[in-house]
């Protein structure tokens, strides 16, 4: 099996058919569709069961688990995937008809696969559009940590080698249901793995009002341990100066202060309370000075 298309889903039965139809239309057919239902209470299970029994050129595998968040579903799916490549496609999105063909074509061009964790196309609101910014030319090789350097911003359509991704599990914190995907993508980058970014939109997005992207501030607030992990990793990998580090600490507190106290927040970050308070005050003072000027 060349590709596992993986979809984590939660109460998205009313949307899944568009993704299903886009998979039926793929020009490349050596793939499976692995769906992990994160505790849905709607008709998702019945819908997938119906599609499993339909005649498709690809197998569909479905598993329902207690609600634990997308990152736990990804951890589980990488262990169950049969594909050489692992492509996360969210339940409210869909693929262009040549998306998987494009992925395989670009993956075959990699000069030394040991240096790469995968390939990536663009995401867009339509085929002729893309999110964020991109570079000039057909492709560029860079790590996830080098994205800003090469003008690769916004959500992209990353596809990873399954065997590599299996070695980079998301941290799971009891009582929390979210951690940024960047925590894993950046760990692979920090270990030297490149991605071949190619300039073609293969993934069509539909950001819903109740989705992760539209509610990211509230989600960060409700998951303070995972957010602390993300902030600390940003500091570790991007190596900001002292004020940059303090700005990250202050940003963390702006996210979580509605749910936890300042002492608890400093403990999750692993820094002493005085340093944390100093960071918050310093950043606030600088902003006041900038606003007055």
Image: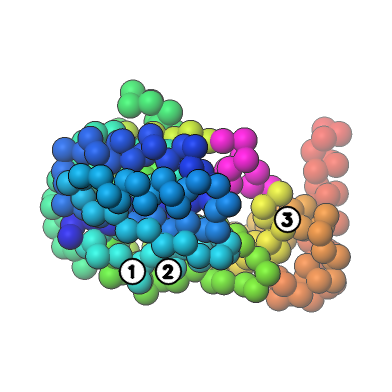
State how far apart marks 1 and 3 are (Cα). Answer: 31 Å
Q: Is residue 89 above or below residue 135?
A: below
State how far apart marks 2 and 3 are (Cα). Answer: 25 Å
Q: Residues within 10 Å of mark 2 (few under 14, many from 20)?
A: some
Q: Residues within 10 Å of mark 1 (few under 14, many from 20)?
A: some
The C terminus, quarter of image:
top right
Is residue 155 covered in magenta?
A: no
**Image quadrant in which you'd find residue 228:** bottom right
Q: Kindly report which numbered mark, 1 or 3, lies closer to the viewer in this rendering.
A: 1
Q: Kindly report which numbered mark, 2 or 3, lies closer to the viewer in this rendering.
A: 2
Mark 1 or mark 3: which comes first in sequence?
Answer: 1
At horizontal 61% and vertical 62% (from top left) the residue drawn is: 177
Tag 1–tag 3 contact (CB < 8 Å): no
Viewer-closest of 120 and 240: 120
Under circle 2, the secondary element is helix
Is residue 215 covered in magenta?
A: yes
Q: Which residues are magenta?
A: 208-217
Q: Is residue 62 above or below residue 270?
A: above
Residue 125 in percent (x, y) is at 43, 28
Q: How many marks?
A: 3
At horizontal 76% and vertical 75% (from top left) the residue drawn is: 267
**Image quadrant in which you'd find residue 224:** bottom right
Residue 221 disc label: 3
Q: Which residue is mark 2?
A: 76
State how far apart marks 1 and 2 are (Cα). Answer: 7 Å
């Amino acid at each position: 099996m060349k590709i596992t298309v993986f979809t984590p889903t939660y109460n998205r039965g009313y949307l899944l058919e568009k993704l299903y139809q886009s998979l039926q239309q793929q020009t490349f057919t050596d793939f499976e569709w692995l769906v992990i239902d994160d505790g849905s209470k709607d008709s998702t299970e019945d819908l997938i069961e119906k599609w499993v029994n339909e005649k498709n050129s690809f197998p569909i595998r479905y598993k329902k688990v207690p609600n634990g968040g997308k990152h736990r579903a990804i951890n589980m799916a990488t262990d169950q995937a049969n594909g050489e490549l692992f492509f996360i496609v969210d339940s409210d999105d869909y693929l262009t008809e040549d998306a998987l063909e494009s992925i395989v074509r670009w993956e075959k061009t990699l000069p030394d696969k040991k240096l790469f964790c995968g390939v990536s196309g663009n995401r867009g609101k339509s085929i002729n559009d893309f999110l964020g910014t991109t570079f000039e030319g057909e492709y560029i090789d860079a790590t996830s940590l080098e994205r800003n350097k090469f003008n690769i911003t916004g959500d992209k359509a990353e596809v990873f080698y399954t065997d590599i991704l299996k070695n980079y599990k998301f941290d799971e914190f009891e009582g929390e249901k979210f951690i940024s995907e960047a925590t894993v993508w950046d760990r692979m980058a920090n270990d030297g793995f490149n991605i071949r970014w190619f300039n073609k939109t293969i993934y069509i997005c539909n950001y819903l009002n109740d989705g992760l992207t539209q509610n990211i501030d509230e989600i960060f607030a409700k998951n303070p341990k995972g957010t602390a992990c993300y902030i600390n990793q940003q500091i570790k990998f991007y190596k900001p100066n002292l004020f940059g580090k303090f700005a990250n600490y202050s940003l963390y507190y702006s996210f979580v202060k509605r749910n936890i106290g300042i002492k608890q927040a400093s403990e999750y970050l692993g820094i002493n309370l005085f340093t944390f308070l100093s960071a918050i005050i310093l950043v606030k003072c600088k902003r006041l000075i900038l606003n007055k000027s």
